Image (cartoon, rainbow, N blue to C red):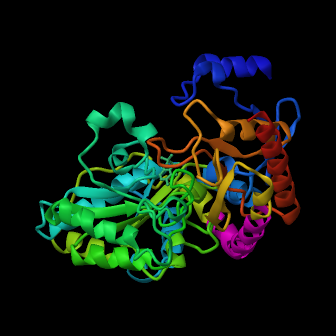
Amino acid sequence: MKSLREKARRYCWIPHIPPDEYDPIVIARADGCNYWDMDGKEYIDAVSGIAVVNYGHNNRRIIEAVKEQLDQVTFSYPSQATTETTLKLLEKLMSLLPDSLGEGKVMLLNSGSEANDFALRAARLHHVAKGDKGKYRFIGRWISYHGATSCLSCTGHPLRRWPFEPQLLNFPMVEPPYCYRCPWKKEYPECDMECALAVEKCIKRSDPDTIAGFICEVIGGMSGGFLVPPREYYPMVKEVCEKYNVLFVDDEVINGLGRTGKMWAFQHYDFVPDIVTTAKGLGGGVVPISAMIASSKVIEPIYETNTRFDLYVTYGSNPVACSAALAGIEVLLQDNLVEKAASLGEYMLRKLKALEPDHKIIGDIRGKGLSIGVELVKDKSTKGMFKDQETPGKEVQQRAWEKGVRILGTKGPGGGLMSDFLALFPPLIISHRQIDKIVMVIDEALTEVERTL
Ligand code: PMP
């Protein structure tokens, strides 16, 4: 195992980790919520890879479907051919979407970044088709990540942006609906929903005739700070978007397909976005695949005016990836995993919240369903953040790994926006007993780290 780790250090370029700190677990075998390293050490995977293996590692039903597809056809060039599997997936995916989204069109891609890039393109094309050619900019939100490709321009994550700032497009950013550290120092519900009003201010100040869309994770995942905005926020933001002819793009790369305890995170709110993207869980950790769904409202002017763009990706709609996604959705529906994510998520959140009084570095615990974050603070009363060189999240992560639970502990997005945090995204098939173990290990790891501070 040591020599394999040395090889990993020698060859892999993981851009955000210095080579001498790169110390990956070398996985030999995986099953359900567990995996084993080369030395036979067992781990509970409390982050589903990274919010990907939602149906468990090596889900047999997905593997069997993929094997069957491998024996039939492994590639079809999307502009000239398709497969029955691909069409079944498209039909199934659309049947899960309400209203004008379900009546729209899907584009299948390979990653979350690509799905978001094409969401921005769909929005841009919609405006071009309607003759609003000046609309090309997108409003993003601080504390966000939408991908490593051109959608980095609407990503509010200073640590991920900094070397590339000169290459990014001039897209405006708004403050997030972050009640624990309200940017306006107000308290819900007496806050007049400043965070929602900020979106209108931003559109007005940025020249509405240039704004094509607003992009956010409706419920934040890891890079979205696990933010769960108040119920009024999205209906207010959507109304503003409609007023200024701005399309609402909902990035459900992490939180789509049941993770938050509803099929789509936006269903926790009384509104429907214009475009939705989803990725990680879609391929079940078996084959990469993502989807961008544009509602009929977005698509109709494009089709009516026959406005086209000559861009797609070679492996988009790959039949093997489609077979994994189709089988995954069947598992999700047959095993009632959306409902399970809701009740297991409540259970896990409750158990984690019970730890809060005993730990001086737990600032806030938030999330929805099985998408949960624990924000770590230096000082509870002032909500003081850790310095750049302090890494309590990473230290808690390390100790949890040693105890056989894989969590993710990391710094916030930088720029003084948020403190360090722990991320939890267990597979939707996790058991109560496994949740108990995860929470117990986090409790122990926090206690050990706190002793060193
Ligand atoms: N959007 C969100 C909310 C994400 O969390 C991520 C990845 N962490 C992406 C987009 C990009 O997805 P991918 O890494 O598959 O390109």
Query: What residue is at 67 percent from the left and 44 percent from the top?
Result: 408
Residue 399, quarter of picture: top right
Q: Main secondary structure of the magenta part?
A: helix
- Does the rendering let one see residue 24? yes
Query: What residue is at 49 percent from the left and 73 percent from the top?
Result: 266
Where is residue 236? Give x, y as percent.
37, 78
Placement of 253 over or under 190, stated as above or below = above
Magenta stretch holds residue 436: no
Magenta stretch holds residue 350: yes
Where is residue 246? Give x, y as percent.
25, 69
Placement of 289 over or under 247, stated as above or below = above
The quarter in which the N terminus is drawn is top right
Q: Is residue 334 left or right of residue 319?
A: right
Residue 120, quarter of picture: bottom left
Q: Nearer the viewer, residue 210 or 351?
A: 351
Q: Nearer the viewer, residue 121 or 139?
A: 139
Q: Nearer the viewer, residue 44 or 202?
A: 202
Where is residue 114? Give x, y as percent.
41, 50
Residue 22, quarter of picture: top right
Where is residue 79? Give x, y as percent.
34, 55
Query: What residue is at 31 percent from the left and 36 percent from the top?
Result: 165
The quarter in which the C terminus is drawn is top right
Q: Is residue 335 left or right of residue 214?
A: right
> Which region is colored magenta?
327-352
Q: How many marks?
A: 0
Placement of 193 over or under 443, stated as above or below = below
Q: Residue furthest front?
A: 381
- Does the rendering let one see residue 372? no
